[in-house]
Amino acid sequence: MATVVAVIASTHHPFYYRASTATGEDRPPFADEWTSKILAFRETLTRARPDVLVMVGSDHFHQLWLDNMPQFLVGKAPSYDANWYNEEREFGLPRMLLKGQEDLSGHILRAGLDSGFDLAFSNELRIDHSITCPIITLRPEADLPIVPIYTNIFAPPLPQPKRFVQLGEAIREIVESWPSHLRVAVIGTGHLSLELGGPRQFGPHGPDPEFDQRAVEWIANGDLDGCLREVTLDSLHSPGNATHGFMDFMLMMGVAGAGAKADYVDTLDLFHTMEAYFTWYPNGAPAA
Amino acid sequence: MSKYLLNKFLFMVDRDPELVERYRSEPRELVAWWEAECANTVLNCHTGEASTWLRFDDVEREALATHDHVRLFELGAHPFLTLTLFIALFERDNTEPLEYQKSFGARLAHFPMPYPDIAT
């Protein structure tokens, strides 16, 4: 059976690509520290020597739209074009082409449907920065086949937080039941407190540093009970109007498993939002 | 009131560079053209099929025609869509980094929690 060699949860910051590649006067003052943290985080994936990446993210109204909105969707295609015109325009993100791992996509769909998740699927999915940001930060060669999984954290009505956790737990079990010798890393990105298009956006920090601190502790300690006790669809409005993206972190806590302490934790306090990076090694940390 | 149709306008204009420019330079004309020609397009469908019932009310039409992002927020348009499109329209006029983004937020400062409902 396949092995889950790493579980990684991260924020996805679309400005990283531009900040890290800027030079001279265009290079922001925080770029060097940010890049150095990303290089250390990248090493946690490299060290796990994955063959396949399961990538959990959330489409930002690019391909998935309100006339036909899935709650959870799995891509099943041989290739995925990536990034969109408005992401080039606003963030300077490059167009990319990623390979798909269709066999694992099919396995996740079948096993997911059979275990109570009515997953939608797409045979032609153009992915966005919720998935390409972690490719850029963690595997910039973009050479590994992926299975994209999209969640709806964006267009209410949303699934309950516990459903994200349950899906994460199911993904872990399903990947580990995939009849394959391949090494799989499950990578998911979300947000800590975040405000987009509201009064608290683009402040000197994230809109709710206190929430961010608690959130980092929940994730780092695998404290699903504490997290589920406090986090509801309603409560997530308070830290910032885009904070429902935190449910993708909760999904990844489900993948890592209740009580699983992260093997690697790092954060970076930036304007607008806090960056946070977590890696778990379900089978023990690989040699450095 | 149709939050859905407001969102559909923001979504369709945002993804088309030509419409972004038309919306910046001639917002009232663009909104009228879009409502007549595009509002009923079924986006996930072959061309030639369309809906028959979608239209703005006067408040919505005026908010879009006057680039009134504060009113759009009040009406429950999806703030991510509004922000993304309005950055495309106006960030180019910045004299310092994030100037437009910050002033966009400041103009919304009078909204108490909870913000207007965005569910469609």
Image (cartoon, coloured by chain):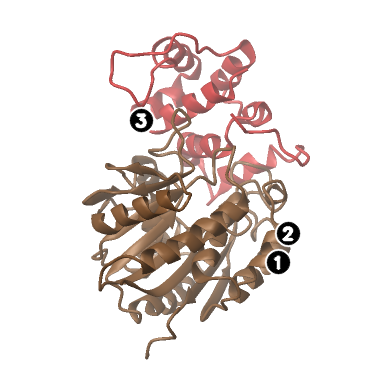
Q: Is residue A79 left or right of residue A114?
A: left
Name the residue furthest front: A114
The numbered mark 2 sits on a residue in which chain?
A: A
Q: Which chain is red?
A: B
Amino acid type, residue under disc 3 in the picture: Asp
Front-most of A54 and A1? Answer: A1
Are dots 2 and 1 in contact, CB under 8 Å? yes
Front-most of A123 and A210? Answer: A123
Are dots 1 and 3 in contact, CB under 8 Å? no
Front-most of A216 and B68? Answer: A216
Q: CA distance from mark 3 to mark 2?
A: 41 Å
Tags 1 and 3 both on a single chain: no
Residue A171 on image: x %, y %: 44, 61
Mark 1 = which residue?
A226
Name the residue furthest bottom: A287
Q: Is residue A268 left or right of residue A182?
A: right
Mark 2 = which residue?
A230
Tell me the element at label 2.
helix
Look at the picture and state if B9 lies above or below A129: above
Residue A196 occupies which quadrant of the picture? top right
**Label 2 crowd bin: few (<14), some (14–19), many (20+), radius 10 Å:** few
Look at the picture and state if A36 lies above or below A75: below
Tell me the element at label 1.
helix
Residue A288 on image: x %, y %: 37, 90
Q: CA distance from mark 2 to mark 1?
A: 6 Å
The numbered mark 3 sits on a residue in which chain?
A: B
Mark 3 = which residue?
B16
Q: How many marks?
A: 3
Tint applied to chain A in the drawing? brown
Residue A108 visible in rendering: yes
Look at the picture and state if A171 lies above or below A257: above
